[in-house]
Image: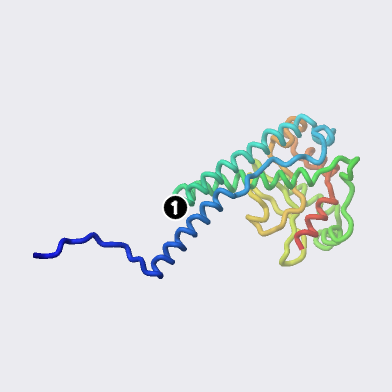
Amino acid sequence: LRPPLQSPTRSSTPSSMALRTVARTATTTARRAVGARSVATLPDLPYGYGELEPVISGEIMELHHSKHHNTYVTNLNVATEKLAEATEKGDVTTIVQMQAAIKFNGGGHLNHSIFWQNLAPPSKGGGGEPDGELAALINAKFGSFDAMKTQLSGSTVAVQGSGWGWLGYDKATNSVAIATCPNQDPLEATTGLVPLFGIDVWEHAYYLDYKNVRPDYVNAIWELANWEDVAARLAAAK
């Protein structure tokens, strides 16, 4: 008689046990990383909603910050949650689908977080002209502050639809440059320039005050430029 067939057993050699331990550890680590990811939050403003008047009304500032920016934050967190779940499951289709939502809402969060800090009431240092290294780089690239201001204003007014105008820093050449980005595309991720000073030309940023006259809004916002913040961004980028 043939001996009864036995079910195959899993090898319990030291090497196979070690491999299973590594696999379990990797899975646990990945799951912990997903659970420990950071959550985006709406930043506080360094001034009151009404402190930028008359250039930007308190009504616009409240809507812009508490509604529009907050929506980008909320949607970014939803998208990153879905991305984390899809990554854990190996769901490549959903992973790809989430890229656009993260770019748009993540860009909106990054751009506005910079924008609020780029502005200051005149009573708190807003307006005027930059000095120090920032002024030197602007003069070296554009000839003068006024020339840079004219060029950035013109490029920003000319943005088709919604978007941003930027003064950025090019690390490779140690120089400043002007660029525009459509929609909420983040400057550094799409151009390589470090964002220093941005002008938001989505209509929700100015329409209640300036209607469809975008040039008036862009020309006025220089009265609120926080050059101390812009200079700090330049120093941090080096």
- Crowding at mark 1 (Cα within 10 Å: few <14, some 14-19, many 20+): few
Residue, x 78% and y 42% (percent of image)?
218
Tell which residue pokes out farthest to the left in this image: 1
How many marks the image carries: the answer is: 1
Q: Position of residue 63 (x, y in %)?
A: 71, 32
Left or right, 165 with reference to 141: left
Which residue position holds label 1?
90
Residue, x 8% and y 65% (percent of image)?
1
Q: Position of residue 114 (x, y in %)?
A: 74, 47
Q: Position of residue 208 (x, y in %)?
A: 74, 30
Element under disc 1: loop
Q: In this rendering, is residue 24 above or below 13?
A: above
Query: Which residue type does callout 1 highlight?
Result: Gly
The quarter of the picture where the C terminus appears is bottom right
Q: In this rendering, is residue 204 above or below 231?
A: above
The chosen color scheme is: rainbow
Closer to us: 78 or 177: 78
Left or right, 72 with reference to 135: left
Residue, x 83% and y 46% (percent of image)?
225
Residue, x 61% and y 38% (percent of image)?
74
Q: Position of residue 126 (x, y in %)?
A: 87, 44
Left or right, 42 with reference to 95: right
